[in-house]
Image (spheres, grey):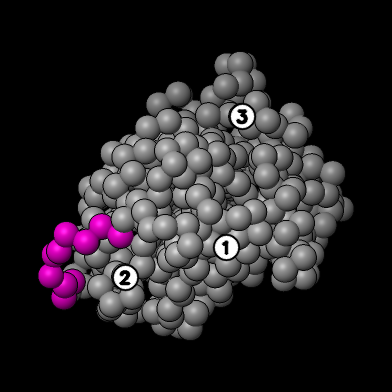
Amino acid sequence: MMQPLLPLGRSRARRLLVGAAVASTVALAVTACSGTGSGTAPASSPLTIGISLSLSGDFSDSGKAAQRGYELWESDVNAKGGVLGRKVQLKIVDDASNPTQVVSNYTNLINQDHVDLVFGPFSSLLTVPASRIAARYNYAFIEPAGGGPSVFEQKLGNLFFVQPAPSTQGGMVFADYILSLPADRRPKTAAYAKLDDPFAAPIAEGIQKKFEAAGIKTVYDKTYPAETADMTPIISGVAAANPDVIVGGTQEADAFAQIKAMIQLHVNPQWLYESNGPNSPADFPKAVGESNTEDVFSSIDWYPGSSQAGSAEFIKSYLAKYGGDELSIDPTSAEAYSAGMLVSEVAKKTGKVDNQTIIKTLHSGTWPTLVGDLSWDQYGAPQGEYKLIQWIDGKIQTVYPAQGAQHAPVAPKRAWSGQ
């Protein structure tokens, strides 16, 4: 996921990796040193945490959502006495969505401001160079919004991605659900409509690989360019193939366009999964009509109806601080808040909050957060999976895995409204 992985009127996951290839060529103009940000100062001194966020530029919507999550955790933890009796003090600086600026920001936060800890920025594009800086200075790097392949290919032992799984694995939970069905109830044929995007297409391709290995025949497979606005020709091709299951490797706008074309052309598969779009509780009903949301599947790490422990308290605290309603809460805020939760949990378990303790401690066990109970491999890739959600009775409900599900999956899909 995806990074990731989601709603609120923008292609969230797509932005996580836009230009990620560029990140590998960003010059890291730093000199290695042995600073560790011990985090072991007296309780009378604050626990300072440095963060670079996109408060301007292309990622500013998401950067500000992360800021809200980080600052809400700061408020909540300080109201409870801080971390090991130390008040948390965040130092957030703007990187303008620029990889070069993010390098300067983290270098300065560590070398000039001497922060005790750092948290990550938004997007894989910025996470890659930022995490290298943290690694050079032996800082833990807990980051909520950089889950693209380029992040984990660095093989950094100090990095921890605060989502259930790498962003491109967002569809595995749907594949697992389908393959958990008795053989006589599984789909026999599948169609794939995929956006040419480094997050969206791999999600669908992962599902396709598992389906084909299990004997589910591919009867249609189309990858379309990002500028495709009219999905009618693509969905017409899907209709001609008459698949049992349709898998959309989508962001948001193209998912809505796919579904509108399905409604218009009366294409109604037994199962319909879209990687992004239907996981937006506010935008999806507005885009396709409330009555046309029923039985559509997607995947997610957090949403306002989540049953994850602590979610209700988070929502209450968020609304008290920022106002609005629960559908206005971006999952990025929950992910950023969860980064702070991990620091609190490490401190509670070890009685310490220095970087080396955080790194060592998080590499073992399972850790509760708003986005699930997390664990990581040696390079910070989460070892879980996203939640499978389905629109049932006009709202998002978790349907798989069965443990913690709010409703059993509904299949076959009911007809579109008006059919």
- In depth, the one of 97 and 262 nearer the eye is 97
The earlier-in-sequence mark between 1 and 3 is: 1
User: Where does the image place residue 16, in percent across and percent down from the top left?
Assistant: 43, 63
Image-quadrant location for residue 277: bottom right
Looking at the rendered image, the disc whose residue lies closer to the viewer, 1 or 3, is 1
Q: Which residues are magenta?
A: 28-37
Identity, as a three-letter code, of the amino acid under mark 3: Pro
The residue under label 2 is 114
Whether residue 251 is visible here, answered yes or no, is: no
The residue under label 3 is 401
**Magenta stretch holds residue 223:** no
Disc 1 from disc 2: Cα separation? 19 Å
Identity, as a three-letter code, of the amino acid under mark 1: Glu
User: Where does the image place residue 153, in percent across and percent down from the top left?
Assistant: 24, 50
Numbered label attached to residue 74: 1
Residue visible at 47% across and 57% down in the picture: 43
* Secondary structure mainly formed by the magenta segment: loop
Left or right of residue 359, residue 394 in this image: right
Identity, as a three-letter code, of the amino acid under mark 2: His
Residue visible at 48% across and 62% down in the picture: 44
Determine crowd level at label 1: few under 14, some 14-19, many 20+ residues with C-alpha closer than 10 A. Answer: many
Residue visible at 31% across and 80% down in the picture: 101
Describe the element under mark 3 as helix, strand or loop: loop
Describe the element under mark 2 as helix, strand or loop: loop
Disc 3 from disc 2: Cα separation? 43 Å
- In depth, the one of 222 and 20 nearer the eye is 20
Looking at the rendered image, the disc whose residue lies closer to the viewer, 3 or 2, is 2
The earlier-in-sequence mark between 1 and 2 is: 1
User: Where does the image place residue 275, in percent across and percent down from the top left?
Assistant: 55, 50
